[in-house]
Image (cartoon, rainbow, N blue to C red):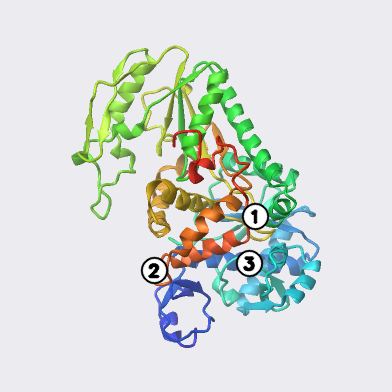
């Protein structure tokens, strides 16, 4: 393919790292067939940057293998355009990091070929007897007659989930830095692919990720292979019970913290799409009641500004996600009155007419009641500017996936949320998987602007991920993803998600409690969602 499109590739404004062939992401050495529709994928795209990151992580693991072949590497999770890694059997020093960096530079400057090699099932079984990565075991345990595909560079083999750059020279912008008891591999983002942006340390987020990772390591389920083993031993119920118990324990802890501080009058909950905010708020409310506090909800959605006052985006469309779309003046007025014991007339926003309407509905807060508010801007103090910080308790919720494919390949938190949303949108909103995938970029953009910058201001973080959930969601999601045709742009993303879900053994819904957060997406929840 590269030879056929060499002129276009070399003259492109941004470096081309892959292509889309009939709306499926392929490497630049993919063999073309007749009637193929080809689009170039550069670094200024999500797909291009995912390939770039995959390439730099492959080069890092190759460098580490050459310098410290006994090292047991675990790629843990992503932090601010960086991947956090640890060595399970070695202490990491600045000298080691310097040597790895030098070796990576050497590998990149040589511009070595990275080739995809297919092993037979027998060859794969023999190979994985000696190798620590568990991807091969996943394919073999699924009786995949085609065996396993690995990426080969010089004498180094490894599996990485997804398309890889065809040469090591594509990944020139990066850094590797010692961080905590491990190290981070830094890389650019797709918006600024030619430079590194500053690393932002999110200590509360890291602490939450570490806590959940340690728990799942303790119970022995931290990779897909290990989860599948539990399913095949009929132990899926244990994984479900442990995950649900962990959620209940964390919710109880948060409720206890709120109840201990008598100054707290407002609980504010925010998180990205498909984090399970609705079910979380309901279950937290139960825990608050056990502490003698009666939760009262108030919807921010009823406090939009009048339509003619709503700001517009760069395309001239109404921007309903920016904080200026909220009538914060009226919202704060009502909050102050409610917290002072006064009764207020609550509006209902008519989205068809674009105006607030008053039907006579009033609200008054009793001494033993506490306001619970959920919304995109709840971590931003501009939303509740007139309320004292001591009266507010902020909660950030997200599905912070800690389950990995294997020791080198993590499962993206964003992918988990997208799969949740695809299922929920179909179940309860009548949207197709194509529609959800198409809208996902704008959803992510809103999260980047209005949620993530404020997450460290939260008093508590709640990880809504469940170790077993993708084994449940696959039976709902795969048929929806298969409805997307290869003539449609969303086909590439659908194919990638289907491949990820195919690694999971199916987990029955019969043992999932009706109070479970996952019920918000698959249905049969005892809470109104």
The residues bearing labels 3 and 1 have C-alpha atoms spaced at a distance of: 12 Å
Secondary structure, mark 1, is loop
* Percent coordinates x, y for residue 350 in the rendering: 24, 35
Q: Could you tell me which quadrant the C terminus lies in?
A: top left
Q: Which residue sits furthest front?
A: 510
Q: Earlier in the sequence, mark 3 or mark 1?
A: 3
What SS does tag 3 mark? loop
- Graded by Cα atoms within 10 Å as few (under 14), some (14 to 19) or many (20 or more), the crowding at tag 1 reads many
* Residue at mark 2: 488
Q: Which of pointers 2 and 3 lies earlier in the amino acid sequence?
A: 3
Q: Earlier in the sequence, mark 1 or mark 2?
A: 1
Give x and y (percent) for residue 469: 59, 48
Q: Which mark is residue 404?
A: 1
In the depicted view, which residue is nearer to us: 295 or 257? 295
Check the image and report above or below for 85 versus 362.
below
Q: Of 61 and 294, which appears nearest the observer? A: 294
**Residue bearing mark 3:** 160
């Amino acid at each position: 393919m590269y030879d056929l499109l060499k002129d276009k590739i070399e003259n492109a404004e941004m470096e081309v790292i892959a292509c889309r062939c009939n709306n499926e992401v392929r490497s630049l050495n993919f063999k073309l067939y007749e009637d193929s529709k080809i689009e170039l994928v550069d670094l200024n795209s999500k797909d291009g940057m995912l390939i770039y990151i995959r390439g730099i992580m492959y080069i890092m693991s190759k460098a580490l293998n050459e310098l410290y072949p006994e090292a047991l590497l675990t790629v843990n999770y992503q932090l601010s355009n960086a991947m956090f890694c640890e060595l399970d059997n070695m202490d990491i020093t600045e000298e080691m990091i310097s040597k790895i960096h030098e070796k990576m530079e050497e590998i990149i400057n040589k511009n070595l070929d990275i080739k995809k090699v297919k092993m037979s099932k027998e060859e794969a079984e023999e190979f994985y007897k000696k190798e620590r990565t568990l991807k091969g075991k996943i394919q073999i345990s699924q009786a995949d007659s085609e065996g396993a595909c690995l990426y080969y560079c010089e004498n180094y083999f490894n599996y990485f989930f997804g398309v890889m750059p065809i040469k090591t020279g594509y990944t020139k912008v990066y850094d590797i830095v010692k961080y905590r008891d491990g190290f981070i591999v830094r890389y650019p983002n797709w918006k600024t692919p030619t430079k590194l942006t500053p690393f932002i340390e999110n200590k509360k987020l890291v602490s939450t990720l570490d806590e959940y990772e340690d728990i799942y390591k303790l119970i022995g389920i931290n990779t897909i292979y290990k989860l599948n083993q539990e399913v095949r031993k009929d132990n899926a119920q244990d994984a479900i019970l442990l995950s649900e118990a962990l959620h209940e324990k964390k919710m109880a802890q948060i409720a206890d913290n709120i109840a201990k501080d008598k100054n707290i009058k407002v609980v504010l909950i925010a998180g990205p799409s498909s984090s399970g905010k609705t079910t979380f708020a309901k279950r937290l409310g139960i825990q608050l009641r056990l502490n003698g506090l009666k939760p009262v909800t108030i919807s921010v959605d009823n406090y939009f500004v009048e339509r003619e006052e709503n700001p517009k985006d760069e395309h001239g469309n109404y921007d309903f996600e920016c904080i200026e779309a909220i009538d914060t003046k009226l919202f704060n007025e009502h909050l102050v009155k409610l917290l002072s014991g006064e009764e207020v007339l609550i509006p209902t926003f008519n989205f068809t007419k674009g105006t607030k309407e008053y039907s006579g509905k009033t609200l008054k807060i009793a001494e033993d009641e506490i306001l619970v508010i959920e919304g995109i801007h709840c971590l931003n103090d501009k939303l509740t500017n007139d309320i004292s910080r001591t009266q507010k308790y902020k909660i950030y919720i997200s599905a912070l996936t800690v389950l990995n494919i294997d020791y080198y390949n993590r499962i993206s938190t964003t992918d988990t949320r997208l799969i949740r949303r695809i299922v929920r949108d179909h179940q309860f909103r009548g949207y197709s998987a194509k529609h959800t995938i198409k809208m996902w970029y704008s959803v992510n953009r809103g999260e980047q602007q209005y949620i993530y910058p404020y997450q460290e201001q939260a008093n508590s973080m709640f990880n809504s991920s469940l170790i077993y959930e993708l084994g449940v969601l696959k039976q709902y999601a795969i048929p929806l993803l298969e409805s997307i045709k290869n003539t449609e742009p969303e086909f590439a993303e659908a194919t990638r998600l289907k491949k990820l879900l195919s690694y999971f053994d199916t987990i029955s819904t019969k043992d999932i409690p009706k109070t479970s957060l996952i019920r918000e997406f698959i249905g049969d929840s005892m809470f109104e969602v």
